[in-house]
């Protein structure tokens, strides 16, 4: 598959993959800078790729605004996947609404219920998963490739703007007047759930604002932490 997208620009690569996996290709958006770029590529070029998001119930008001504005601008659906009610209620009943601050295990449990399980449902029955990952976002992502096999989810992953810099992303958003989350202008390079995200201070790592109370060098919620293998074919 690497040969199929090699030397193609992101739009051409997305078009080629949509033709290769008709009805079995999806894009996950969290409405950050990178994801808004890819949503524009898909919607503006009428590429038949289903766009979905994980509605954790704890998003920023600014994120909901961008979600709504994106649907208004392009007139296309964005499918929402919610946590399983029974699992969410059981966790909150037993541990309260903010148990994720108490331990890494509790935080991973919350991410598992609010994000990982809904993601599995969103990916089920598909063969290709498009993401907005860029290589320079964190050290553990520099070792990745733009085309990979996700063993945990049993799906091919493609990162169309993997080699882009943040300046490239900003320039694209400005050029095409793409709606974006204004939290980015206030020091939030990575935006997740509101209780788990803060602004990043000058000199801090890209993901320092995510789960900032945890002493970890690599902080991932698990969405992209499964076993990955490069796809050379």
Image (cartoon, rainbow, N blue to C red):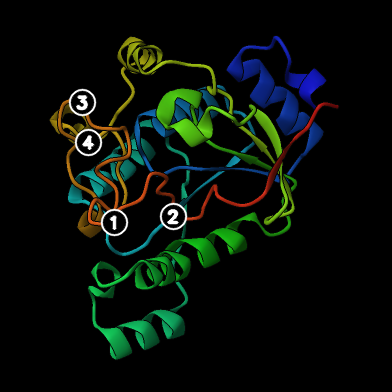
Tell whether 169 sits left or right of 39.
left
Q: Residue at x 44, y 50 (%)?
A: 220
Instruction: For marks 3 and 2, give the CA distance.
Output: 23 Å
**Earlier sequence position, callout 1 versus callout 2:** 1
Instruction: Please state if 72 lies on the left or on the right of 101 as rendered.
Output: right
User: Which residue position holds label 3?
Assistant: 203
Disc 4 target residue: 188
List the residue tagged with mark 1: 214
Q: Answer with the quarter of the image where residue 110 lies.
A: bottom left
Label 1, label 2: how many angstroms apart (C-alpha)?
12 Å
Q: Position of residue 111 (x, y in %)?
A: 41, 64
- State whether residue 132 appears in this view: no
Q: Which mark is residue 221?
A: 2
Disc on the earlier residue, 4 or 3? 4
**For the residues marked 2 and 4, what is the alpha-carbon distance in whole angstroms?**
17 Å
Percent position (x, y) of residue 16? Answer: 74, 24
Which label's residue is closer to the chain start, 1 or 4? Answer: 4
Q: Earlier in the sequence, mark 3 or mark 2?
A: 3
- Report if the CB atoms under discs 2 and 4 are less than 8 Å apart: no
Label 3 with label 2: CB-CB less than 8 Å: no
C-alpha span from label 4 to label 3: 13 Å
Question: Residue 76, how many percent across, how many down?
Answer: 47, 40
Secondary element type, mark 2: loop
Q: Which sits in the foreground, 112 or 183?
A: 112
Residues packed near mark 3 inside 10 Å, few (<14), some (14 to 19) or many (20 plus): few
Between the residue at mark 1 and the residue at mark 3, the CA separation in whole angstroms equals: 18 Å
Pointer 2: residues within 10 angstroms few (<14), some, or many (20+)? some
The CA span between labels 1 and 4 is 18 Å
């Amino acid at each position: 598959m690497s040969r199929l997208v090699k030397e193609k620009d992101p739009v051409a690569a997305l078009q080629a993959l949509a033709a290769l996996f008709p009805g079995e290709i999806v894009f996950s958006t969290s409405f950050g800078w990178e994801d808004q770029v890819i949503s524009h590529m898909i919607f503006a070029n009428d590429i038949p790729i289903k766009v979905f998001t994980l509605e954790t119930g704890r998003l920023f008001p600014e994120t909901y605004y961008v979600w709504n504005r994106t649907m208004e601008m392009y007139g296309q659906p964005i499918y929402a996947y919610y946590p399983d009610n029974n699992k969410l209620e059981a966790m909150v009943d037993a541990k309260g609404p903010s148990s994720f601050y108490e331990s890494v295990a509790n935080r991973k449990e919350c991410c598992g219920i609010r994000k990982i399980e809904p993601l599995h449902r969103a990916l089920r029955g598909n063969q290709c998963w498009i993401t907005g990952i860029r290589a320079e976002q964190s050290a553990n992502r520099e070792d990745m490739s733009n085309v990979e096999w996700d063993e945990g989810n049993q799906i091919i992953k493609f990162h169309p703007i993997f080699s882009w810099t943040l300046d490239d992303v900003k320039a694209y958003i400005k050029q095409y007047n793409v709606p974006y989350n204004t939290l980015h202008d206030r020091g939030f390079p990575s935006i997740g759930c509101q209780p788990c995200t803060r602004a990043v201070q000058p000199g801090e790592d890209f993901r320092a604002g995510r789960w900032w109370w945890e002493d970890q060098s690599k902080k991932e919620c698990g969405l992209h932490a499964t076993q990955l293998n490069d796809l050379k074919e």
